[in-house]
Image (cartoon, rainbow, N blue to C red):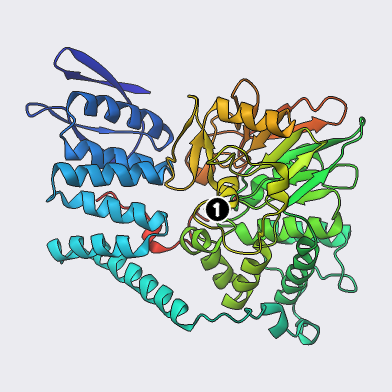
Amino acid sequence: TMKLWVLHTNCWVTHYVMFECMIKVQLNSNFVFSFPYSEKDYENAIKYYSEALELNPSNAIYYSNRSLAYLRTECYGYALADATKALEVDKNYIKGYYRRATSNMALGKFKAALKDYETVVRVRPNDKDARMKYQECNKIVKQKAFERAIASDETKKSVVDSLDIENMTIEDDYTGPKLEDGKVTLKFMKEMMDWFKDQKKLHRKCAYQILVQVKDVLSKLPSLVEITLKETEKITICGDTHGQYYDLLNIFKLNGLPSDTNPYLFNGDFVDRGSFSVEVILTLFGFKLLYPNNFHLLRGNHETDNMNQMYGFEGEVKAKYTAQMFQLFSEVFQWLPLAQCINNKVLVMHGGLFSEDGVTLEDLRKIDRNRQPPDSGPMCDLLWSDPQPQNGRSISKRGVSCQFGPDVTERFLEQNKLDFIVRSHEVKAEGYEVTHSGKCITVFSAPNYCDQMGNKGAYIHLRGSDLKPEFHQFTAVPHPNVKPMAYANTLMQLGMM
């Protein structure tokens, strides 16, 4: 690793040279440097731009470039704030409009994004990338308006009601796995995993059978699932898998296939980003059907329509199957439980704790989850919030929910007589992180996230005897040459403008 030393007055700042793209850093009116920074080192990029802004807080370029780094690390709320600040400093800085539009798109604020893309196109009418994104954003805004116009108070008809699965024909030339008498078996699961490993597609009839059956199973579960581990039993908790199918197979290789004696809990964000999300989710749903009482799935913030529209899952399902099947996936996702309590002592959720004190386990039991998540409240927080090192609460770096400190964690655990929480939702270099004096644990199970972050993956063992977390790390394994985000909306292909 090379080090580029940049002199600003009497201060030296270290930058790590690892990234192929060049970004200009202007430290003052006399010195302009170009340096590459690592896709794996955005945190340092944020750090150094922050230091530069302390020295020169009126530089729109710094805010814009830090906004890009925040976008890459999925801190969309911070990215939006920086892009807005860049425009406050210089209302004619066109990159600021572009960054702000991208941030708003990531947050599902399509109308606000459209306004800024329109500004970029007006100033740069020959910019093909900006025009394409303006047109795509305009299409989404019109689609949303149409959906609102035709919406009614009538109960929405389920996709299941329009399916005739029994009469779906499996063609003679299909040699892949089939359900046995319409049921998932261990033999079927092993054959399906091998079939997927060879990049082959499960027959649509089998996929529909799995989805219809798992919807029925999930809809009978409470929003807060409560289980008890006996002293001799253990459970494996996995974090985000994000469509990284070959890394999921590696988890099962390292830790054993799921079974009634080898239970798992997968903590949300099964899909999006990675381009094998269909394979991941059908495998997880298959095991849920095979071991309904010992294979657990919780909803993540990416098991939602807005995220799926932007980050690839909707596009992937439509490419591999049909729009109708995506609608059924959407229905199933709405029945995924939101949290799980183990031995009345450990609470597991995808995101984290709440924007207000006083939330109880009984409140979680009462959540009506069969919907797209609201913009605020306990359901939103369970999917979106993040811990922070300082006490209190802060505005979310993601632009949704909040960040909560160790005092918030302590009060919640004490009120609900819990020992600690386990959550996911954030990439961690080591695959896991223990914060808040051991009372807030993050686990992330997508190693080398998006083929670029260089992080390890991890899973956790909890044993009924003591509930002491045991961490197991692993690294990414090779996968076929299909890039992450291959099916994502073109608006999420972040340009360097």
Q: Quadrant of the N terminus?
A: top left
- Neighbourhood count class around disc 1 (C-alpha, 10 Å): few under 14, some 14–19, many 20 upward: many
SS category of the residue bearing label 1: loop
User: Which residue position is annotated with label 1?
Assistant: 274
At 55% from the left and 57% from the top, the residue drawn is 275
Question: On the image, which quarter does residue 213 sit in?
Answer: bottom right
- Identity, as a three-letter code, of the amino acid under mark 1: Gly
Residue 459 coordinates in the image, percent (x, y): 70, 35
User: Residue at coordinates 48% horizontally, 56% vertically from top-left?
Assistant: 485
* Residue shown at 39% from the left, 63% from the top: 490
* Image-quadrant location for residue 101: bottom left
- Viewer-side residue, 277 vs 163: 163
Q: Residue furthest left?
A: 30
Q: To which quarter of the image does residue 283 belong? A: bottom right
Q: Is residue 81 above or below residue 46?
A: below
User: Could you tell whether 198 is left or right of 57 in the image?
Assistant: right
Give residue 297's position: percent from left, percent from top: 72, 51
Q: Position of residue 377 (x, y in %)?
A: 55, 50
275 and 102: which is toward the camera: 102
Left or right, 260 with respect to 40, comes to: right
**Could you say where residue 286 lies in the image, as x and y percent from the top left?**
78, 60
Left or right of 84? Residue 304 is right
